[in-house]
Amino acid sequence: MSIQFKQETFRDDFTFSNSPEQIQRFPFPFDKDSFMYSVNLEPHADGRKDSAYEASFDVDEHYVSEMHDRALVLDEDPLRCQSLPHMTLAGWDVLELIMTEKSRDYPDLFTLERKGNQCHWINRPLEIDQHFTFGDETTLPHGPMEYITRQAQGDFCLLDQRNDNLWMDAGIVTTQADWSLDFDIGMNFFEWHAPVPLAHEMGIFQRALKFLLNIQQGRPARRLNWTLTINPRLDTSPENYHKWGIDKATVAPENVGDKVHLRVELQTFWRLPRSNALLFPIRCYLIKMSELVTVPKWGRRTHRVLRDIPPELADYKGFASYRDTLVAWLSQYDDGEKTSPGVWPE
Amino acid sequence: MSAGTGKLDVLVTDIKPINTLVKRFQFERADGRPLPNFSGGAHVVVEMKDDDRMRLNPYSLMSSPLDTSHYAISVRRDDQGRGGSLFMHNQVAVGDRLVISYPVNLFALDLRASKHLMLAGGIGITPFMAQMAQLAANGSNFELHYSCRSRSLASYAQEISAHYDHRIHLYYDDEGQQIDISTLLSGQALGTQVYVCGPRGMIDAVCSQATAAGWPDQAIHFEEFITPPTGKPFKVRLARSDKTITVGEHQSLLEAIEAAGIDAPYLCRGGACGQCETDVLSCDGSMLHNDHWLTEDQHASEKKIMPCVSRFEGELLELDR
Ligand code: FES
C-alpha cells in the first residue's frame, strides 16, 4: 500500500491531522477501562497487518513533515543530537539496522545496495540518494546515527551497556515529552528515571533493567507509554517550555476536542550487534480527542480511563488542570456500553 | 526454547587440531548467507544431540567480528568432564549440521578505555582473539598477557604474536614464567580497562589484586563459564509443573528440567548471566552453589538456585518451576 505523505506543521499554525486510515492504525494504549502503571514489555515481532506494529520502524503519512520538523529543531538547537566519543560504532550499528529493516519493510520507499563496505542508500520520500563507505564517517554529511535518524520518525536513545547498567551515551531527541537529552546524557538507567513517582517503590525498575540488559540480537522488545499534549506539538522539550507551557491555559469546553491530543510513545528496544549497545527508539504518535472518538470503543474507554485515574498520576502526566473539562467533553461519547478486551478498534 | 536468543542452523566447514587438547571448529550458515554481526567477547551456545541426550554448551567466538562469512570456536578436550567436549572432539565431523544460538556478549569491551589490558590463561584466550581483531581494526590500544602450561599447549600463541607483535606477551608455566600481576597493574595509565579470562584462580588473583590496588570495579572485567560439575544424583520437586524429577550424575539440574519437557529460561548455561535464577520453595538438605551470579548471602539463604551449574545433596529440593 503506498502512503500519501502529508504536508503539515507541528508548530505555529498546527495544521497536523490524521486521515481516517491513520486513525484506524493508531497505537491505542488502553487495553481495558482502567489504567495501572506497569512495565508492559512484550516482544516487538509478528506485527499485526496495517497497524503501527507491522514494520520494525513504522513509516506513516506524517513521515516527511516530521522529518522537516526535526531539521528545524536541530537548526535551532544542535545539542538535541549528541554522541559521546565511544558511541560511534553503535552509531554505525543504528544506521545499518534502520537501513536494513526499512528497505526490507518498505522496498518501494527505501533501497540499500551493498558490496562489502560500499553502500548506496536511496530514500525516495525524502529524495535522498547517497553513496558512502560503511565505517567511514567522512563519506556522510553527518555522523552515522544523526544521518539515519534524520530520516527516521521518533527520538532515538543509544544506551551503552556496562557494569550491569545502561548509560544514555548518545541520542537524537526532538519530539520528546518533556525531558532533555542534554540533561540526561551520560546518565545511567536509574539516574534518568529518577523523577518517576510511585513506580520506584514497586521495584519494577529493577526488573525492567534486568529485562533490558538481557535483550538479545534479533529479539527486540516494545512497550507503550502515553500522556496528553495540547496542540499537535512534537517538540515539548524543557528547553522550550516557555513556548508550550502556556498552552494548557487555552483549553476550554468549546475547543477541548481539537486542542487535547493523546500522545502515545511506542518504545522499542534493540540489541546492537557490533557494539553490544542497546537502541531505544521512542516513536511519538499524536491523535486529537475529536479524532479518537470516531472509534466508538476508544471514545468510551478513554473517558473511563481519564475519569478514574488517580490524581497523583494525572498530576505527573501534567493534565490535572484541564482534566475536568476533558472528561466532561468525553462523557458525551460514553453511552455506558461494554467495551471489548484489547486495544483494537472492535 | 526459553533462551532469550534466536537459533542459527550452521554447517561445520572446518575442524583443525591446534594441539593435543584443543580443536578449532568453523561454522558457516547452512543457507549460505552471512552470519549475524557480533562484538568481541560474545559466545554462542552449541546444541549437541548425543543419542537421546541434549547438551548445550557455551563457547566464545574467536573469529574476527569483521568477517561474518564464518564463526570459529575452540574446544578444549576434558576427559573427566560431562562429555560435551568429548562429543565435539569425537563425534562432530566436517559437513555436519549443528544448531547454535545467536551471539550473546557477557564479556564486552568498554569502548571508552584509553587502553585495554588483557590477561588470558589457557583456553581463556578465545574471546580475546575476537576482541583483538575488533580493536586492531580501529586502531585501539591493547596489550595481551597470555599464560599457558607449555609451548606445545599454547594455542594460537604463534599466530597472534606474528599478527600483533609486541602487544602480545607470552608466559610458559613449565619454563617457570608467570605473569607478574601486581607490577603489571600498577604500571597502567588512568583510563585503562582490565579484562581476564582463564582458570578461576587466575580470575580471583587479578580481581583481588586490582581491587587492592584501587582499581574501580567498573574497570575490571572477567568471564568464566563454569562447566556444570558432576555429582551424586538427586531428586527435585518442580512445584509449578507438578513433577518430580531425578538429576543424573552427569546431568545439570537445568538439563534435567528441560528433559522433563519444561521450558526454563537460560542464556549462558555457565553460572554467569543470571537468566536461570529460580526460587527455592523448600530445601531439606544442602545446596551446592557453583554460580557467579548470586551473592554469598543469597547462597546462604537457600532461597535461590542457579540450575545451570548448581546441585543439591539431601532428601528433597522443591523449586518454583
Ligand atoms: S543460564 Fe546463565 S546463570 Fe544460569
Image: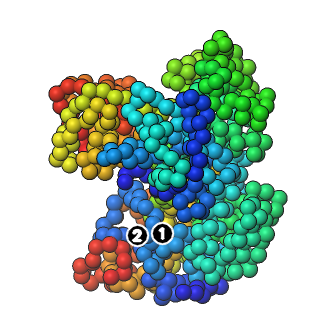
Three-letter amino acid code of the residue under disc 2? Pro
Disc number for residue B165: none
Q: Position of residue B188 (x, y in %)?
A: 72, 24
Q: Which chain does tag 2 point to?
A: A
Vertical order, A343 against B225 (above or below): below
Q: Quadrant of residue B178?
A: top right
Contact between marks 1 and 2 (CB within 8 A): the answer is yes
Give the crowd class for mark 1: few <14, some 14-19, many >=20 residues within 10 Å.
many
Q: Quadrant of residue A294?
A: bottom left
Instruction: Name the quadrant of the N terminus of chain A.
Output: bottom right
Residue drawn at point x = 36 percent, y = 77 percent: A344
Disc 2 designates what residue?
A29
Q: Which chain does tag 1 point to?
A: A
Q: CA distance from mark 1 to mark 2?
A: 7 Å
Three-letter amino acid code of the residue under disc 1? Val
Residue drawn at point x = 45 percent, y = 72 percent: A47
Q: In this orientation, which residue lies closer to the viewer: A316 or B9? A: B9
Q: Is residue A315 visible?
A: no
Instruction: Name the quadrant of the C terminus of chain A.
Output: bottom left
Ligand 1 image position (quadrant): top left
Residue drawn at point x = 26 percent, y = 51 percent: B261
Disc 1 designates what residue?
A264
Residue B170 in the figure: left or right of residue A141: left
